[in-house]
Image: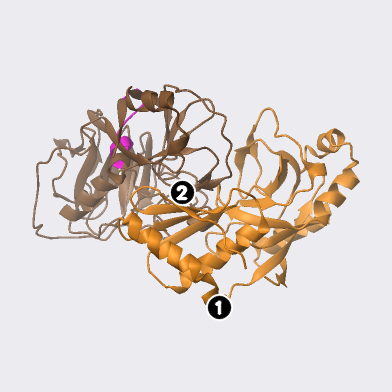
């Protein structure tokens, strides 16, 4: 497999930033994840890694870093990254979305601007698999890539002061789910009843970077059922294993 | 148990932070001025990570329901225990029924109340630091009760020290941030040859500077941010992310505050003057 030119920059006393070429590409993300698996396999305590698109922020919680020493360690790990057998499993998550205008208050105006019917918009939004390129901004917020060009629409001119938890939005080249009530400027087309952040769960966020998301249209009745199932703890989002 | 009789402007339980969840978008949180917390816990012979009460701008009125020992650090808020004035860096015995109250802010912005053994609220995801949606609330309110372990007697190794507050200066030491090289000569001059004042937009998430510098039109892919990351918005606004700051961002990270300077900035309030100095 091909190797990319990696840039490593200091980032304060305890962190460095590793950057791959400045592109949103699944092959680059996959290379980053392979590197991260290899780094985890070194089992050095105290490191945290957070990936977003083409970069990984590597934070060492234990101590201040010697930059040159760290850079050598990371580059060496990168060149040996294929020597580690990865146990990572990628999942495709099917997340239910209710596109009823009660939740998706902008769906009619969005469909109008995109010259689609509401049904066509929903069909397009649910027919693609979106790659999780990062999780950040809010706990459990996924940066999703792979939105078809036909669904690209600018952010709202005025952000809303309150967007409800679970709201599914469109903005520019992005689609995503607000994991909590939050101010926000995305066009809201529906709501997903699955909680993306559960602080009391063993794994507070079930999705991992590199996973894929596909949305599935549900009715209002199914939406309410999922909310109740989630409250009593019996709802599990549907997942399938993807070959890496 | 510590009972909050009156909560003041903003008080919250904080330890040194919640580590290991940056990859799912959870900020570190924890005390804004961690140096003050470490000093207080040191004097009480606590673990450095023991939870304290962070008190911003105006003080609460608190009632102790069990005997213990406390130590105040950080901002000076004219604290009194049953109307007797208290000093920072002093280990003080408190008895059941004692009332701790605060008066005028004379120095700094965030005061810390540390207690022998730390406050024992529930640890969630490895930390007691209050942050929504990890914890249900982000601050303590009137009537809240906070558990701690009673201590009847204890002989502190050091009962008080006199030290100059670490935040008694207005110079923030900065490293180059990942996008430092995007800065033009004009922007560099503006950042390093002028002074800035803290805007009204300052809280546990971020501190904005009131003065604008020249803007830019760089667009970049979202990437990781840290407490102390100084972002430059297209309009030319410098925003310093703090402990509850988001873990990723899309603005160029032009500078990175030293850890000590994060503590200094945490003690600044709206209108305070600051300069940046490159390390």
Which residue does the numbered mark 1 point to in the structure image? A85
Region of the chain picked out in magenta, as a range: B263-272
Q: Is residue A40 above or below residue A106?
A: below
Structural crowding at the residue carrying mark 1, measured as other residues with C-alpha within 10 Å and reported as few (<14), some (14–19) or many (≥20): few
Relative vertical location of residue B78 with respect to residue B68 in this rendering, above or below: above
Residue A45 is situated, as x and y percent measured from the top left of the image, at: 37, 68
Q: Colour of chain A?
A: orange
Q: Chain of mark 1?
A: A
Please tell me in which quadrant of the rendered image residue B200 appears.
top left
Q: How is the image coloured?
A: by chain
Spot occupied by residue B122 in the image (x, y as percentages of width and height): 41, 60
- Is residue A207 something one can see in this rendering? no
Where A182 sits versus A86, above or below? above
Q: CA distance from mark 1 to mark 2?
A: 37 Å
Classify residue A94 by image quadrant. Answer: bottom right
Q: Colour of chain B?
A: brown
User: In which quadrant is the C terminus of chain B drawn?
Assistant: top left
Q: Residue at x 47, y 27 (%)?
A: B237
Q: Residue at x 34, y 43 (%)?
A: B32
Between residue B183 and residue A173, name the one nearer to us. B183
Residue bearing the label numbered 2: B131
Given the image, what chain letter belongs to the residue carrying mark 2? B
């Amino acid at each position: 497999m091909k190797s990319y030119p990696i840039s490593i920059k200091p980032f304060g006393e305890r962190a460095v930033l590793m950057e791959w070429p400045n592109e949103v590409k699944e092959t680059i993300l996959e290379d980053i994840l392979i590197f991260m698996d290899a780094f985890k396999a070194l089992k050095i305590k105290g490191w945290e890694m957070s990936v977003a698109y083409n970069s990984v922020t590597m934070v060492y919680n234990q101590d201040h870093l010697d930059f040159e020493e760290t850079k050598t360690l990371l580059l060496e790990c990168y060149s040996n990254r294929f020597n580690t057998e990865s146990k990572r499993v990628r999942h495709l998550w099917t997340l239910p979305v209710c596109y009823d205008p009660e939740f998706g208050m902008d769906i009619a105006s969005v469909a109008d601007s995109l010259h689609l019917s509401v049904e066509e918009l929903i069909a397009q939004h649910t027919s693609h698999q979106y790659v999780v390129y990062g999780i950040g901004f809010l706990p459990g917020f996924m940066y999703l890539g792979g939105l078809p060009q036909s669904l690209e629409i600018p952010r709202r001119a005025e952000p809303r002061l309150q967007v409800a938890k679970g709201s599914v939005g469109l903005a520019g080249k992005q689609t995503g789910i607000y994991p909590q009530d939050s101010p926000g400027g995305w066009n809201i087309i529906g709501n997903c009843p699955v909680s993306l952040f559960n602080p009391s769960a063993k794994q507070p966020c079930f999705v991992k970077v590199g996973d894929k998301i596909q949305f599935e249209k549900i009715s209002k009745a199914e939406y309410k059922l999922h909310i109740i199932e989630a409250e009593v703890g019996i709802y599990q989002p549907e997942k399938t294993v993807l070959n890496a | 148990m510590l009972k909050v009789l009156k909560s003041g402007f903003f008080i919250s339980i904080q330890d040194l932070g919640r580590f290991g969840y940056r990859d799912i978008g959870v900020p570190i949180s924890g005390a804004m001025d961690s140096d003050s917390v470490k000093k207080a816990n040191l004097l009480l012979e606590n673990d450095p990570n023991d939870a304290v009460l962070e008190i911003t701008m105006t003080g609460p009125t608190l009632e102790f329901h069990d005997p213990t020992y406390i130590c105040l650090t950080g901002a000076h808020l004219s604290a009194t225990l049953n109307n007797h004035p208290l000093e920072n860096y002093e280990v003080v015995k408190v008895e059941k029924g004692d009332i701790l109250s605060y008066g005028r802010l004379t120095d700094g912005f965030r005061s810390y109340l540390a207690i022998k053994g730390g406050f024992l609220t529930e640890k969630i995801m490895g930390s007691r630091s209050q942050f929504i949606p990890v914890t249900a609330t982000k601050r303590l309110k009137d009537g809240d009760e906070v558990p701690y372990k009673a201590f009847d007697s204890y002989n502190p190794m050091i009962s008080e020290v006199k030290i100059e507050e670490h935040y008694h200066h207005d110079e923030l030491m900065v490293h180059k941030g990942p996008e430092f090289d995007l800065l033009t000569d004009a922007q560099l001059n503006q950042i390093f040859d002028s002074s800035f004042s803290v805007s009204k937009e300052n809280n546990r998430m971020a501190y904005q500077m009131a003065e604008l510098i020249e803007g830019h039109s760089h667009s970049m892919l979202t990437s990781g941010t840290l407490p102390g990351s100084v972002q430059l918005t297209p309009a030319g606004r410098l925003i310093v992310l703090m402990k509850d700051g988001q873990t990723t961002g899309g603005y160029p990270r032009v500078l990175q505050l030293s850890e000590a300077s994060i503590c200094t900035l945490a003690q600044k309030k709206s209108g305070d003057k600051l300069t940046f100095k490159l390390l």
